[in-house]
Amino acid sequence: MRGRFLTGALIGAAVGMMVMPGLDRNTRRRIKRTAKIVRHAAGDVYEGVVDRVK
């Protein structure tokens, strides 16, 4: 449950930053890095759920 909340919060923050006007290059890089981290975390959570279901 906590993993879902954290993942949703991070995705929401990243999307919010993307729609802000006038993003500079550094901000875009940080968003990409954060998105990569979130993708990996979501994958880990998914694998954990699959393992528990088995």
Image (cartoon, rainbow, N blue to C red):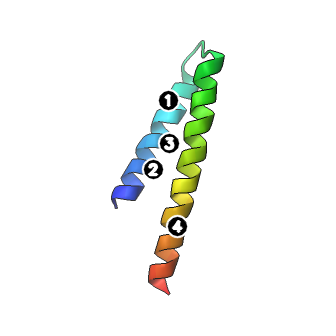
Q: Secondary structure at mark 2?
A: helix
What separation in Å lies between label 4 and label 3 (alpha carbons)?
Answer: 16 Å
Where is residue 14? Give x, y as percent.
52, 34
Other residues around mark 4 within 10 Å, as few (<14) / some (14–19) / many (≥20)? few
Q: Amino acid at mark 1?
A: Gly
Query: Given contact means CB atoms under 8 Å apart, are the residues at marks 2 and 3 in contact?
Result: yes
- Tell me if 50 is positioned left or right of 28 in this view: left
Q: Secondary structure at mark 4?
A: helix
Which residue is identified by label 2? 7
What separation in Å lies between label 1 and label 4 (alpha carbons)?
Answer: 24 Å
Q: Secondary structure at mark 3?
A: helix
Q: Please state which of residues 40 and 14 is positioned toward the viewer in this rendering.
A: 40
Other residues around mark 3 within 10 Å, as few (<14) / some (14–19) / many (≥20)? some
* 33 in relation to 6, above or below: above
**Mark 1 or mark 4: which comes first in sequence?**
1
Q: Amino acid at mark 2?
A: Thr
